[in-house]
Amino acid sequence: MAQLRLTDFFGRTKAAVSLPAKHGARGLKAALVAPPEPRNHGAVSPPPASPRTPTRSAAPAVPRMAGRKRSRREMEAETPGGERGGKSARKRLELPRDAGPEPASPASLGPPQPPIASRLCTPSPEQDSGTTPRLEQEELATLQSRLQRMRMKPPTQPPPIPAGVGAELRSRLQSLRGLELRLRAKAAGSGTGQPGVTGTEAPIAAQNSSTQLPAYQRFHALAQDTPPGLTLPYKYKVLAEMFRSVDTIAGMLFNRAETITFAKVKQGVQDMMRKQFEERHVGQIKAVYPTSYRFRQEKNIPTYSSGVKKSQYQLTLEPVLGEDEQLCGRPHLSASRLLERRKEFHRSLVNIVKQHHAAFLAALSPPMEVPEDKLTRWHPRFNVDEVPDISPAELPQPPQEDRVSTAQEVLSAARGTMSTKMEKALANLALRSAEAGAEEPALSKAASPASTSSALKGVSQELLERIRAKEARRLQALMTREMGQEERLAMLGRLPAMARILRGVFVAEKKPALPMELACARMADSFPTQMAAGEMEKHLRLLAELLPDWVTIHALRTDTYMKLDKNADLGLVTERLEKAAKEAEAL
């Protein structure tokens, strides 16, 4: 067996490397296609090629020795389609031809299809050749031309109205307006009951009365949770709140032995109420509650503001307290006393409104007279918010000896130094000011419909007087009704509906008697207005009190039962209940 020589290795490697360079592509192809030489199993395989061999040369596969691990470079060289130069080899998966359908060639597939959006926007060649796109283009062109003509066309003028037709329309419109005015005058005359009120004046008067005050002042009584009663005007409520604020600030200053000046009280009240507080309001407080404070003009009071000098006179307030209201040997304004003063101020305001209300009742036809101690609410036609303001009482003024304040003083001081006309004018002015000061504020009076309206012509005067007297009695009973009586009237108004529901409950239960708790629960579930079990029991006991022959209540040991006569006529029962409610309302 011949031994492989080292010279053979170098000669073979050199021939393989130089072959492509000499013969070009044809020699390279021949070297790659040539079959390998027969291997001798006894001989040792030659070592790998030299590392100086070019990487891109097509070197023939060198047989490797058995049991020798292949390097990465050899694996890349043996892999078909592998790349040298450090890149990773990728294998291409090729399916056999008989394993599936043949891949379509590019020629058979045709031209590449555009995306869906482009196909929707761009018509296909078949569509371009069709008639539909042409029609769409023609319609588009037609619409564009019409739009252009409409833009360029001047606006059309309405046809002129003939002179005769316009005059006829104007005359018809004038007659319709006159008819509307007559209808309004007739409706206003029948509704107000006052003569001399035309249809145009009534809406204007109503509008003026409704726009005099804002809504939060006209409907302030509706926003309160208290029952309707002797409500105060909005301006009186504001004054009561001002008095409470003044009392609070004055109490703090008085209890720490500090002089109460108007400047301090004014700033505190404005901070508490966010409203303007002036000396006029202090005068109104004095007019409503004269014994609440002592007012004086004092000077040499320490001030901490640059606007008021210490030598100037200032209005001071001092609460009027009793001898027993003392703490540690000095007067003290307690919280209970503040509450009493606040209630007294409110009662004084109510008394002032009662005086105006009495004047209103005296001006009615027929006149009414209601005792003030029995009055529980105002007359329905008495407008509380139209009560005039309280005239401020006179407050002490700082002494001014050198200044002339009245026309009489000017006349007496300058007598003999002025002309006759000037003295006569000053005398007339002094007389007028004296007469104005002597007049007292007149109370509010309501306009009384003395004469009969045109809608009541032909009606007997005696019948009208009886109707008015009956209405006056009803309103007087309404104004003097107590709160307990008002609650009883409300309960009597609910009893007819409750009687029908109660009979249905007994018929559904199929029992002659039911426990009071069960009956109240069933009634509360069936009554349309939500009501507690205790309130429902009050209604049922009142029902048993009014109709003892129909509903009876029996107390057995610890339980209370209710028994009802289901054979009684329900219509007669409801009629009796309605009659009882009317009688109670007339009282």
Image (spheres, helix red, strand yellow):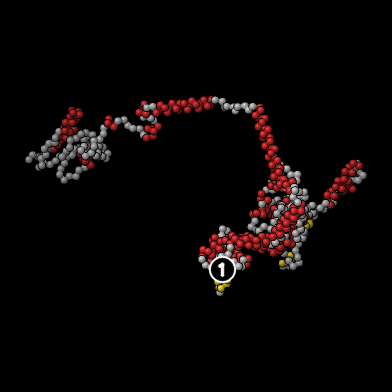
Above or below: residue 139 compared with residue 102: above
Q: What kind of element bears circle 1?
A: strand
Residue placed most toward the observer, 436 or 522: 522
206 left or right, relative to 127: right
Look at the image and tell me in which quarter the N terminus lies.
top left
Residue positioned 72% across, 67% down in the render: 328
Residue positioned 44% across, 27% down in the render: 139
The location of residue 218, given as percent across then percent down, is 68, 51
128 left or right, relative to 342: left
The location of residue 118, given as percent across then percent down, is 38, 32
Above or below: residue 92 compared with residue 468: above
Q: Is residue 239 visible?
A: no
436 left or right, relative to 517: right
From the image, tell me which residue sits under label 1. 563
As shown in the figure, which amino acid type bears the numbered disc 1? Answer: Lys
The location of residue 197, given as percent across then percent down, is 74, 44
- Splitting the image into 4 quarters, where does residue 246 fall? bottom right
